[in-house]
Image: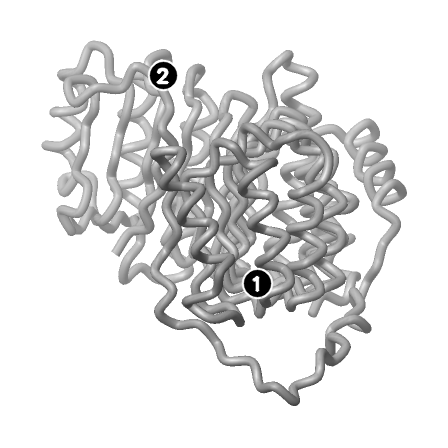
Amino acid sequence: MATVHHLNLDLGITPENTYSLAGKQIKFDSSADIEQYVKELDLFKDLKKIDFSGNTIGIEASKTLSEALLKHKDTIVEINFSDLYTGRLNTEIPQSLEYLLPSLLQLTNLKVVNLSDNAFGLQTIDPIEAYLAKAVTIEHLILSNNGMGPFAGARIGGSLFKLATAKKAAGKSSLKTFICGRNRLENGSINYLAVGLRNHKDLEKIRLYQNGIRPAGISKLIEQGLASNKKLKVVDLQDNTITTPGAVKLADSLGNWPELVELNLNDCLLKNKGSLNLVESLNAGAPKTSITTLRLQYNELEEDSLKVLVEAVKEKLPNLKVLELNGNRFEEDSEFVEQINEVFEERGYGELDELDELEELDSDEEDEDDEDEDDQLEDDLDLNELEANLAGKLEEHGDSNVDEIADELSKTHIK
């Protein structure tokens, strides 16, 4: 089943200018298999969106579709090719992409590309990497549940840096959305990913949920990466391991995101010390008027952090509408829970999630130091040197440097 991402963009897309075969489970092998659908495409005069998600396409049909796309190269703004390779061999997928992705580069107004829920992995990274490095028109990229792993993730990061450079040279705005969840990015991708993302100065939405990133990786990603993205509105790190060290870096960076609307830290094991750092940061300084959604489930947040959070909700988060706290360590009938509900009731908006899975804190349980405080990156590269190195390769070799970056990565031990 395809992953659903709602971007809420106004791109002039309507049912009338959309061609969708979403979820039809059609098997396109030969050119003949896809011929009738290509003819339907040809009938459109102002085609803006194509959605082939939930079908499966082979090499020959990909060639035919790639040619059909070019007939609408000046009108298409969104392509959804998610869940497009069910049952395909890992030798078929890269050959299909070698037809489809170069065609996407010729779509002069393409803004949104969704390639989620395809089993790309490392064996298909070459055509994706080559495409991303040149896709100067796209502003919203969705790459979730692709089985990448840290090595492929690092190569995506390198291609994002190259894309940022190409966009700047072409006078185009940088990426505004990057969604890359459920890809096992882990700590091994962070050096290149942080460098790639921080160069997209217009980035507004980042979702990196369920990637197995640990505290050292989160800390570096935030401090040396996302802290530079001053226009961020959505930060989603759900289901990675942040603990206290990562939470401290996150708390320190909140001031860098004055337009932040949503912060999703559900299932991130902030620990109580980390939770306290975060809520104290929310409660400091001027009101955070843009924040409407705060997700803090399953983080071992305790009563002392909850008390500070109440103050923040009252004084610093006047527009908060969604607050999620289930799975933490306080009593459901806590006076602070009651106070939060009272604030929401007085405002006439705001909702606290159902607190039906709260943890019990043993009275004799000590607040032990985080096991992950000594977590370290296997290759803790100097990111300024890495960026200078990548920029030098671009200047020296131009478009031919993708293979060189891949060779460089292959020498790096990524766990």
Q: Secondary structure at mark 1?
A: loop
Of label 2 and label 1, which has the lower sequence position?
2
Q: Residues within 10 Å of mark 2 (few under 14, many from 20)?
A: some
Using the image, tell me which numbered label, if any, was put on residue 196. Answer: none
Q: Position of residue 125 (x, y in %)?
A: 54, 51
Which quadrant would residue 74 be assigned to in this image? top left
At label 1, counting other C-alpha atoms closer than 10 Å, the crowd grade (few under 14, some 14-19, many 20 or more) is many
> Which quadrant of the rendered structure holds the N terminus?
bottom left
Image point 35% across, 17% down: which residue? 11
Q: Which residue is mark 1?
A: 268
Position of 32 with respect to 156 (left or right) is left
Disc 2, disc 1: CB below 8 Å? no
The picture places residue 81, in percent across and down from the top left corner, at 33, 41
Between 30 and 350, the one lying in front of the other is 350
Residue 401 drawn above or below residue 305 = above
Determine whether the residue tagged by mark 2 lies in a helix, strand or loop: loop
The residue sitting at 49% across, 26% down in the picture is 138
- The answer to whether residue 408 is above or below residue 289 is below
The residue drawn where x is 68% and y is 18% is: 168
Using the rendered image of the protein, determine whether residue 19 is visible from the camera's viewpoint.
Answer: yes
> Residue under circle 2?
73
Where residue 237 appears, as percent x and y from the top left, is 56, 53
Query: Where is residue 22 drawn, in percent x and y?
Result: 19, 41
Is 390 positioned to the left or the right of 100 in the image?
right
Residue shown at 38% from the left, 64% from the top: 355
Can residue 125 be spotted in the picture?
no
Closer to us: 40 or 281: 281
The answer to which of 410 and 161 lies nearer the viewer is: 161
Q: Nearer the viewer, mark 2 or mark 1?
A: 1
Which residue in the rendered view is the most extreme toward the bottom? 364
